[in-house]
Amino acid sequence: MNQEKIGKFIAKCRKDKKMTQSELAEKLGVTDKSVGNWENGRNMPDLSLFKPMCDELGITINELLSGERLKKEEYQEKFEENIINTIDYSTKKINLIRNNLGIVLLVLGILISFTAMTMFASESSWGSIYSVFGAIISLIGVSKLTKNFKYSKRLIICLAFFALYIIALFIIDYISVVSLRQLPRFCTIKTGNGYVYECDNPLYKVYRVNSNTPNEYVIIDTKNEYTIDTIPVVPFNRDKSGIDNIIKYKNKYVGNNSNDSNLINSLPLSEYGYVFAIDPDNLSLTIDYHITDWYIDENYYVEKSLLYNSVSIFALIDNVKTIKYNFSGKTYEVTRENVENYYPNYNEIVKDGINKEAFNKYLESKITDDEFVDTYFTKIFI
């Protein structure tokens, strides 16, 4: 079907009828721009307009599709040719519409999944539901795009697409878990004690500790090392204050303000605000916290934090001798000598610089034991 030839023929017949494009358009219920596009060969009139347009122009449909006036002896041959061309044109137009719809559904599904992954909180089931819904919408789009393929090939493409889409959702979810320290969207949530959520993903587990508190933290267990009973539970934010983070602030000398500030800011109690001062002559460190100690001392939080902070600072800053902690109305003081003499296994913690495994075993895991904290706090602190 020669669109350019048909367009010129429509223009000639219109002019023979002494009609303008606007007049023909008005009679057919379309815009004059549409008529202009037909006559320039940019596109074809809709099939539903063939009969009324031919009536207005005084031609047959067969002549319209041929793009010329036909003699009697040409009529049958052109008729058969035009039938084939019309079927081919209709098929291409249907395929074009279907492909466009397929692309729209494919993009729409991706947008639904992306929106669901960003708009809903990670612990909300709606995020995972809408993400999968978006995957199904995109799958329908791919199905329409592959409509002309053989059934077996089409089935393989659709299954492969859906599998890769779901894998991509899991990868994006895992990246969000690692980078944003949040629960995975695709998981089964189990509640442990009042402080721990366990989320079982097919590939890993995530534990959220101190849920809905300022000291909430997340542990990602890709090696299946923990259970809800063995997961490290500490009263502070382990992501911020754990040895894996604070070890980077190890320094030989007190007085490096940037390093000392970063270390103090990472340790428990910093969440309440503080200022600190260094006495380089006496190798001492004074930290003034902007809160009263008894106000936050639920479950020995102050004692646990000060014990943890002191062992951490002495282990990470080699030459500091004394630390003084000031609260509104109360002061606690600790010396390196007391920590070295009375804190159990301190030498194991600082062996070869600092031993992370020993740190977790002899400090982190002990800090939740109220009896241990009470016993050694009274021995160490002045």
Image (cartoon, rainbow, N blue to C red):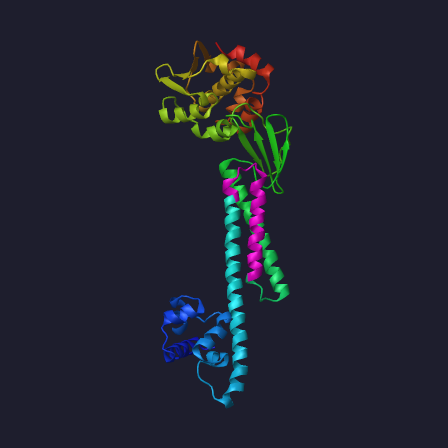
Residue at the farthest bottom position: 73
* 275, 358: nearer the viewer: 275
Image spot of residue 292 (x, y percent)? 46, 13
Q: Is residue 66 left or right of residue 221?
A: left
**What secondary structure predominates along the stretch shown in magenta?**
helix
Q: Is residue 87 left or right of residue 266?
A: right
- Residue in view at x 59 percent, y 58 percent: 158
- Residue in view at x 64 percent, y 64 percent: 152
Image spot of residue 277 (x, y percent)? 36, 17
Task: Say whether residue 355 is visible.
Answer: no
Q: Is residue 180 left or right of residue 206?
A: left
Q: Looking at the image, how many numbered discs can be counted on the residues?
A: 0
Does 138 lie within the magenta span? yes
- Residue in view at x 36 percent, y 18 percent: 278
Task: Say whether residue 95 is visible.
Answer: yes
Residue at the farthest left position: 281
* 155, 105: nearer the viewer: 105
Above/below status of 333 relative to 81: above
Above/below status of 49 relative to 236: below
Image spot of residue 240 (x, y percent)? 48, 29
Image spot of residue 343 (x, y percent)? 54, 16
Q: Is residue 185 left or right of residue 36?
A: right
Figure quadrant of residue 326: top left
Residues drawn in magenta: 116-144
Does 322 lie within the magenta span? no
Above/below status of 17 relative to 269: below
